[in-house]
């Protein structure tokens, strides 16, 4: 068997006699120490506590050797409880003499593999052949150590989904277990939690977090959440392609740079299963891959990237600009780049809010795809994002039905995607169809559709509905600070001069730069900017360009 992590599997001994305990551990280390870690304990309760810790850390236990006659908890009782945590570990009982009753009972109760008589000298004859056979049996069980986070939750729990989606979008590897499956139950027991406390996250270091907030989780898995200093050359708000592009250019050109992201870097692009039209990736690239590379590139040049920090205010001071966080903290800089993009519009139909994360998902095709295997799923929307999701999900689901309000897919979707969709046999496109209601208990079970032309209603069984229905900027917090268009997009450069004069309050003897907002030193790039092209390449390009303009601003301020 190939052992995936460099952690050694464990041989655990428990014996209340210190002399015997030391001797057995010494003999085991001498023979197995290179491949296995020998852990020595002196009572049943101590051994169980150790096993719980090992479980949380993702270690695996190959063999349990327990003395039978111990005060408080017998070896048999210990092995019985230990089986709940490590059912694959092979078990042997140590007895001072042939205690046949205990051995027979053990065979029946704990499926004992062997029992060993003390003393076992010489070990080459009496101990190692037995342990060899135990190890062989364990190797056949194919248990592997885990060196990644583990998440235990419920398939239809919105919080469980939130946690998994956050980890996935931040490229934190994890293993997912439902609270119903045996391994999930074992992890819950080891963490002292139950099915009511989900989601439970066990970090690679073995700490268990019960129903953690996203901020708590970010800090635990090593994502930065607080700035390291209190003044920067540029604060970038938003970690999508525009923000990450700007961070790479700003930091590589020597600007003290901090990027603040509300949730997970990557923005909308991070949700894309395959971006086919970004320059330099002829075979396409997933949003997660692109984000991971961009984030590493930004780090390499020295940009700070903070996640899970929501910016809720911008204050322009005489010689600086401050962005304020939800918790009242702030970060101050010479200049600010707004790269907050756009957010999905919510589906405004009865039942949608209650079922979000429980069958209704916004733009989260990647995270949920494995769960859709063999299901019939629905996608609402007719633009590129919906089309990409349909192509991606069709590889997992039995049937994908796209619900499109308009009468022609070609008016809202790129030609290459329309063609791909037409060629995939398990995708249906229903034009002129709207979703008007959702229903279900603890998860989505039924959707109500309406034919826009005839008004005919129908209901359909549905476990999954992915929503991609256009998006809007969330810029209310900029009210009164920078000018926005009626839909909330930030006006910059030439758009601010459209009425023939400079913006109100503008006190410099130059016009605003191309990507500069109505307040000097505040810039906007990417989808949040009025009249921007809503594409990855243009967002990245604007991010880079904004930094050039920041240099101009810093030189002349
Ligand atoms: C599923 C999908 C597929 C797509 N496929 C393609 C494609 O194939 N090709 C293509 O060219 N384009 C594609 N697009 C469009 C493209 O992803 C966007 O145009 C691009 O991501 C815009 O980048 P941005 O940085 O301006 O904004 P966004 O990507 O929207 O990023 C903005 C970021 O700012 C953060 N933020 C917002 N407000 C705050 C705040 N107050 N405080 C802190 N952070 C905040 C958000 O959480 C987000 O991470 C796709 C979009 C989607 C949704």
Image (spheres, grey):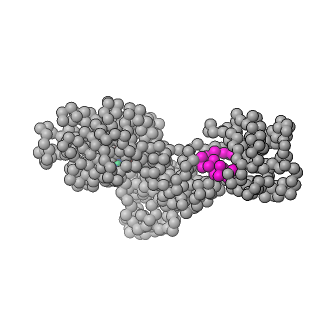
Q: 404 or 109, which lies in front? A: 109
Residue at 34% over, 53% down: 326
Query: How far across and down, in percent of the image, does residue 300 sit?
Result: 41, 32
Q: Which residues are magenta?
A: 47-62
Residue at 27% over, 55% down: 476
Q: Is residue 221 visible?
A: yes
The quarter of the rendered structure image containing the C terminus is top left
Residue at 37% over, 46% down: 261
Q: Residue furthest top?
A: 253
Q: Is residue 273 magenta?
A: no
Residue at 32% over, 49% down: 329
Q: Quadrant of residue 244?
A: top left
Query: How far across and down, in percent of the image, does residue 297 sit?
Result: 41, 34
Whether residue 218 sits left or right of residue 237 in the image: it is right
Above/below status of 359 relative to 22? below
Q: Is residue 337 visible?
A: no
The quarter of the rendered structure image containing the N terminus is top right
Q: 372 or 193, which lies in front? A: 193
Q: Is residue 58 magenta?
A: yes
Q: 442 or 98, which lies in front? A: 98
User: What secondary structure characterizes most of the magenta part?
Assistant: helix
Query: How far across and down, in percent of the image, does residue 229 sit?
Result: 34, 39
Q: Quadrant of residue 187?
A: bottom right
Whether residue 149 sits left or right of residue 409 in the image: it is right
Above/below status of 136 relative to 87? above
Query: How far across and down, in percent of the image, does residue 203 sit?
Result: 54, 47
């Amino acid at each position: 068997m190939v052992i995936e992590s460099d952690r050694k599997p464990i041989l655990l001994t428990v014996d209340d006699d210190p002399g015997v305990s030391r001797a057995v551990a010494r003999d085991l280390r001498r023979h197995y120490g290179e491949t296995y870690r020998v852990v020595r304990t002196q009572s049943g309760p101590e051994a169980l506590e150790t096993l719980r810790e090992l479980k949380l850390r993702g270690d695996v236990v190959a063999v349990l050797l327990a003395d039978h006659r111990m005060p408080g908890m017998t070896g048999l009782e210990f092995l019985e409880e230990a089986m709940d945590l490590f059912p694959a570990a092979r078990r042997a009982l140590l007895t001072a003499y042939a205690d046949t009753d205990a051995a027979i009972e053990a065979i029946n109760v704990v499926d004992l593999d062997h029992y060993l008589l003390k003393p076992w000298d010489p070990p080459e004859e009496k101990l190692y052949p037995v342990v060899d056979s135990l190890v062989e049996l364990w190797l056949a069980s194919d248990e592997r150590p885990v060196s990644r986070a583990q998440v235990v939750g419920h398939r239809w729990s919105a919080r469980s989904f939130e946690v998994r989606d956050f980890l996935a979008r931040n490229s934190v590897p994890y293993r997912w277990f439902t609270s119903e499956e045996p391994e999930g139950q074992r992890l819950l027991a080891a963490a002292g939690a139950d099915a009511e406390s989900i989601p439970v996250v066990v970090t690679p270091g073995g700490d268990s977090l019960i129903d953690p907030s996203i901020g708590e989780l970010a800090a635990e898995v090593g994502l930065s959440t607080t700035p390291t200093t209190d003044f920067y050359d540029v604060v970038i708000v938003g970690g999508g392609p525009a923000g990450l592009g700007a961070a790479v250019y700003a930091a590589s050109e020597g600007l003290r740079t901090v990027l603040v992201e509300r949730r997970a870097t990557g923005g909308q692009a991070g949700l894309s299963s395959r971006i086919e039209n970004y320059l330099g990736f002829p075979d396409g690239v997933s949003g997660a891959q692109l984000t991971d590379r961009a984030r590493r590139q930004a780090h390499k040049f020295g940009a700070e990237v903070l996640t899970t920090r929501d910016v809720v205010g911008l204050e322009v001071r005489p010689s600086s600009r401050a962005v304020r966080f939800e918790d009242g903290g702030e970060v101050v800089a010479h200049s600010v780049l707004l790269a907050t993009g756009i957010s999905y519009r919510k589906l405004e139909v009865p039942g949608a809010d209650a079922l979000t994360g429980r069958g209704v998902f916004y733009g989260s095709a990647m995270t949920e795809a494995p769960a859709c295997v063999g299901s019939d799923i629905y996608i609402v929307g007719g633009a590129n994002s919906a089309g990409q999701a349909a192509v991606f999900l069709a590889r997992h689901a039995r049937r994908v039905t796209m619900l499109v309000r308009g009468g022609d897919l070609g008016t809202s979707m790129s030609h290459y995607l329309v063609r791909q969709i037409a060629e995939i046999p398990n995708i249906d496109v229903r034009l002129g169809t709207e979703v008007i209601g959702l229903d279900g208990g603890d998860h989505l079970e039924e959707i109500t559709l309406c034919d826009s032309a005839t008004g005919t209603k129908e209901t359909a069984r549905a476990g999954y509905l992915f929503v991609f229905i256009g998006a809007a900027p969330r810029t209310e917090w900029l009210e009164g600070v920078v000018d926005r268009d009626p839909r909330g997009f930030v006006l910059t450069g030439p758009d601010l001069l459209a009425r023939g004069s400079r913006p109100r309050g503008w006190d410099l003897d130059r016009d605003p730069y191309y990507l500069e907002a109505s307040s000097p030193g505040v810039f906007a790039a990417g989808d949040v900017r009025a009249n921007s092209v809503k594409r990855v390449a243009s967002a990245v390009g604007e991010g880079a360009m904004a930094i050039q303009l920041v240099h101009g601003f810093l030189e002349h301020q």
